[in-house]
């Protein structure tokens, strides 16, 4: 085993230096600078505490972000006493979680997509991914929409007819479930890390930076798989986290109903706006194969733990907050939030759609009623192949280089604004998304610049702003 591991690493390291000679260095970094290393270690240490802090702030301090710190400062509580008051791991929560994940694995692996045969315009079934830096094109079974529909049909059937479990089950087990989600998040990231050394799916696309923390966090394998179809990135990125997102919100809504005998308009808004975002994700799952998460990021703790813990616990903070603070917005405020959310969604979707249309038809399409303008560019993959590509410079892609992120941020702000101005906790999401998307923008541009070289420079000259024209 040791020999195999060493051979895999040597092969990869050998290939790494070989490739370093080539110009096709547009995948993830081979070298880790000090800033990246410090950020990685800080995230590994602090991210689990951030999740714990926010969840406990709601559970014990009425969703006040400052109260735990103030009480710690005054000596009213200690870190240990907060920890001791947290609901602990329970086997009943572990069973719920195991059934949940097991069911999602079953749906993903054993129920091939049929929805694309019945729903016009929906792209599902076996689809090609993007070309990897090593020049490989993976196949994926796209059945996320079907999994989402089956799961939600069962959820509603249970709430309406079967009553096998309470619709507040997720809220009622929220913290014990968090321990289970952490167990899975760490287990899957560690497994992927070890697997990369022992039996990588595609050694050509592995990246060993020589720094163990960076490798663990950002991943070594590009597309780890078990068997032909269990793709770690597609499964953990989309399910169970994103399928759970709408169920978690529904559980919060039921809890509000149970506690107060009514559901506030803010809770309905959060459910609707985030529901649209989730449905959009599954409707466009084939398109997501071409986004950064799937076609550029390697699979490590960042994706593994992030999808299991960070996403379900922090993306749903608005609904959790509204269980503790039921906010009823005035009609005018509710309408303003709805319009902001829908406008953000429109920009997000249209921008993404324009690029997809443009790339699928290789520029032979119309955007905003005209033939698109673009910049021709070329790049090399690690196998030495020369490829051609085009960068769109009209439509929303002529307004800013990442206007899809701008739309996403407007939608995120709407979820937060639905919670009123009583506390800052629900605003965590917009702060986080801003950091994530600005960082992603810089990261992506760095990659594109390495990939396209002077052609990328021509593109940034033609479209000078990243997110907001005239500002950034
Ligand atoms: P993009 O969909 O914007 O993809 C960026 C890639 O598109 C680039 O790497 C480049 O790839 C190509 N590209 C860049 N400029 C152009 C152009 N002018 N014309 C044609 N192709 C171009 O980024 P993401 O994958 O990050 O995001 C996808 C969506 O997902 C976004 O709307 C984002 O808001 C959302 N998102 C949401 C997150 C969340 O947590 N809610 C997290 C991350 C993303 P190539 O090498 O092919 O040229």
Image: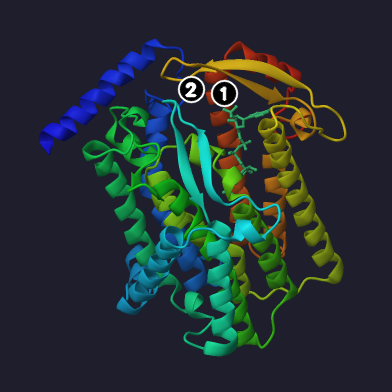
Which of the two residues, 208 or 132, is positioned nearer the viewer here? 132
Ligand 1 within 8 A of label 2's CB? yes
Disc 2 and disc 1: Cα gap in Å? 7 Å
Q: Is residue 88 left or right of residue 280?
A: left
- For residue 403, the mark is none
Q: Which residue is mark 1?
A: 448
Residue 367 position in % (x across, y down): 81, 34
Upstream in sequence: badge 2 or badge 1: 2
- Where's the N terminus, which quadrant? top left
Residue 230 appears in the rendering: yes
Ligand 1 within 8 A of label 1's CB? yes
Residue 472 position in % (x across, y down): 71, 30
- Residue at 56% x, 30% y is 444
Q: Which residue is mark 2?
A: 26
- Residue at 59% x, 79% y is 156
Task: Locate ligand 1 by image quadrant.
Answer: top right
Q: Quick check: 301 above or below 73?
A: above
Residue 408 position in % (x across, y down): 68, 47
Q: Is residue 383 left or right of residue 349?
A: left
Are the residues tagged 2 and 1 within 8 Å (C-beta)? yes
């Amino acid at each position: 085993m040791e020999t195999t591991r060493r051979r895999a690493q040597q092969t990869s390291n050998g290939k790494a230096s070989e490739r370093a000679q080539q110009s096709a260095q547009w995948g993830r970094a081979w070298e880790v600078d000090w800033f990246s290393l410090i950020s990685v270690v800080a995230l590994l240490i602090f991210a689990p505490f951030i999740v714990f802090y926010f969840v406990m702030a709601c559970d014990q301090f009425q969703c006040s972000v400052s109260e735990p710190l103030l009480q710690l400062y005054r000596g009213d509580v200690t870190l240990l006493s907060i920890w001791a008051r947290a609901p602990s791991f329970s086997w009943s929560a572990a069973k719920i979680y195991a059934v949940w994940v097991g069911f999602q694995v079953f749906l993903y692996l054993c129920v091939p997509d049929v929805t694309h045969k019945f729903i016009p315009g929906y792209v599902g079934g076996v689809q090609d991914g993007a070309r990897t830096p090593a020049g490989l094109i993976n196949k994926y079974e796209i059945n996320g929409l079907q999994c989402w529909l089956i799961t939600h049909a069962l959820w509603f059937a249970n709430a309406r007819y079967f009553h096998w479990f309470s619709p507040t089950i997720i809220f009622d087990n929220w913290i014990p479930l968090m321990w289970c989600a952490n167990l899975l998040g760490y287990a899957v990231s560690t497994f992927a890390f070890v697997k990369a050394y022992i039996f990588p799916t595609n050694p050509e696309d592995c990246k060993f930076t020589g720094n163990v923390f960076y490798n663990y966090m950002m991943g070594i394998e590009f597309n780890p798989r078990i068997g032909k179809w269990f793709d770690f990135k597609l499964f953990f990125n989309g399910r169970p986290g994103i399928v759970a997102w709408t169920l978690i919100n529904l559980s919060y809504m039921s809890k509000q109903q149970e506690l107060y005998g009514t559901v506030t308009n803010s809770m309905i808004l959060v459910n609707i706006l985030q529901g649209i975002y989730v449905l959009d994700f599954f409707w466009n799952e084939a398109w997501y194969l071409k986004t950064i998460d799937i076609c550029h990021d390697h699979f490590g703790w960042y994706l593994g733990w992030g999808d299991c813990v960070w996403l379900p616990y922090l993306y749903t903070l608005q609904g959790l907050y509204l269980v503790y603070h039921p906010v009823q917005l005035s009609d005018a405020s509710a309408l303003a939030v709805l319009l902001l959310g829908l406008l953000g969604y429109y920009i997000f979707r249209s921008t993404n759609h324009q690029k997809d249309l443009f790339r699928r038809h290789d520029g032979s399409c119309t955007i905003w009623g005209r033939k698109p303008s673009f910049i021709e560019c070329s790049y090399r993959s690690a196998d030495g192949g020369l490829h051609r590509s085009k960068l769109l410079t009209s439509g929303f892609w002529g307004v800013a280089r990442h206007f899809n992120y701008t739309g996403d941020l407007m939608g995120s702000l709407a979820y937060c604004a639905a919670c009123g101005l009583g506390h800052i906790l629900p605003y965590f999401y917009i702060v986080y998304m801003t950091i994530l998307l600005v960082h992603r923008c810089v990261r992506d541009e760095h990659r594109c610049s390495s990939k396209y070289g002077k052609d990328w420079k021509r593109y940034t000259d033609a479209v000078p702003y990243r997110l907001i024209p005239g500002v950034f």
